[in-house]
């Protein structure tokens, strides 16, 4: 039922993890995909995932924390693939997010977390909104947030605040860009065992998290790809400004204590 043929997507941080699965599933649904990553080799792997689905893939490596680089990335995607319909701002810090008790937060860590999660997302959104408005055919912007944006983010205070900022940004953008036919949504994953996140947890921790989840399973990266396809499609054409939790029910337990020192939430 979902056919995104003829559409062009741009996915940031799509060389690995959730971003690569989102790029893969958008391609599976018919999109050509511009694959951003900081790391050129990873970007190439993301492109390979797209072309394996029979669609055009284009590497647009850039550091999305840098305004000039972000503008060039969006311009390169449009120049290379002809247009822009779906933008997914996925870059963030999760498995490698610095963790500490609140009173021990270091200024440098706060800045790096806010930069990579919130500042980078805003910069991308501005460049993408400008391009979509110029194209004047509507579009969809999906911002990757986190379950931690919806409850206290113990030992991850700056991360939770940055992701909550993304949810708020999404509301403002949806309101302002709605008249241009541009929908804006946040995807909020629960713990998802990507290559960066898996090493943070020991097996015992994973088992305890699974046991705490109503669905008794964690979110899989590919399930976030499927969700992105749905949200980008006309099946979701009346949905904008929302954050969509994809967390196997983790929100239902609301405030979850950190399970072991040094263990991450999601
Ligand atoms: N994995 C989880 O449990 C989880 C849970 C909730 C939310 N999230 C969010 O999902 C998103 C993806 O998470 P993941 O686990 O797939 O991450 P990941 O670390 O596996 O992949 C992130 C990719 O982004 C790239 N990247 C990092 N900084 C960049 C930059 N400045 N510019 C361009 N590319 C950059 C990395 O090279 C990497 O390929 C993040 O926003 C994260 O906060 C993840």
Image: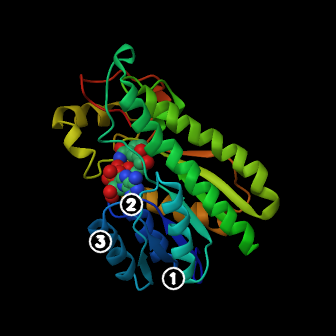
* Residue labelled 1 has its Cβ within 8 Å of some atom of ligand 1: no
Q: 10 Å neighbourhood of mark 1: few (<14), some, or many (≥20)?
A: some
Structural distance between the alpha carbons of marks 2 and 3: 16 Å
Q: 10 Å neighbourhood of mark 3: few (<14), some, or many (≥20)?
A: some
Provide residue 229's location: percent of width, then percent of height.
53, 66
Instruction: Give the camera-side residue of 71 and 93.
Output: 71
Instruction: Give the camera-side residue of 215 and 31.
Output: 31
Identify the residue at image location x=61%, y=79%.
Answer: 83
Q: Dots 2 and 3: beta carbons under 8 Å?
A: no
Earlier residue among tags 2 and 3: 3
Front disc: 1 or 3: 1
Q: Residue furthest front?
A: 68
Q: Quadrant of the N terminus?
A: bottom right
Q: Secondary structure at mark 2?
A: helix
Q: Which residue position holds label 2?
A: 222
Q: Quadrant of residue 28?
A: bottom left
Q: Secondary structure at mark 1?
A: helix
Q: Quadrant of the C terminus?
A: top left
Instruction: Give the camera-side residue of 130 and 53.
Output: 130
Residue 91 visible, this orientation: yes
Label total for image: 3
Q: Which residue position holds label 1?
A: 80
Identify the residue at image location x=62%, y=52%.
Answer: 185
Q: Which residue position holds label 3?
A: 45
Q: 10 Å neighbourhood of mark 2: few (<14), some, or many (≥20)?
A: some
Provide residue 26's location: percent of width, then percent of height.
49, 71
Earlier residue among tags 1 and 3: 3
């Amino acid at each position: 039922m979902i056919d995104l043929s003829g559409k062009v997507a741009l996915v940031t941080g799509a060389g690995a993890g959730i971003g690569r699965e989102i790029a893969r599933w958008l391609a599976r649904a018919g999109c050509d995909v511009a694959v951003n990553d900081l790391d050129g080799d990873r970007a190439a792997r993301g492109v390979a995932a797209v072309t394996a689905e029979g669609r055009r893939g284009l590497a647009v490596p850039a550091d999305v924390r840098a305004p000039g680089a972000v503008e060039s990335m969006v311009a390169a995607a449009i120049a290379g693939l002809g247009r822009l319909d779906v933008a997914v701002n996925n870059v963030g810090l999760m498995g490698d997010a610095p963790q500490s008790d609140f009173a021990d937060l270091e200024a440098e860590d706060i800045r790096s977390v806010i930069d990579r999660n919130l500042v980078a997302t805003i910069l991308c959104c501005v460049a993408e909104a400008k391009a979509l408005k110029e194209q004047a055919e509507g579009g969809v912007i999906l911002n990757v947030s986190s379950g931690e944006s919806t409850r206290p983010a113990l030992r991850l205070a700056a991360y939770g605040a940055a992701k909550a900022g993304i949810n708020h940004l999404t509301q403002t953008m949806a309101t302002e860009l709605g008249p241009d036919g541009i929908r804006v949504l946040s995807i909020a994953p629960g713990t998802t065992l990507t290559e960066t996140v898996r090493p943070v947890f020991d097996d015992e921790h994973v088992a305890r998290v699974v046991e705490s989840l109503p669905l008794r399973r964690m979110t899989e990266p590919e399930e976030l790809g499927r969700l992105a396809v749905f949200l980008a499609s006309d099946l979701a054409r009346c949905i904008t400004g929302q954050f969509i939790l994809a967390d196997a029910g983790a929100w239902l337990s609301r405030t979850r204590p950190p399970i072991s020192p040094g263990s991450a939430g999601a």
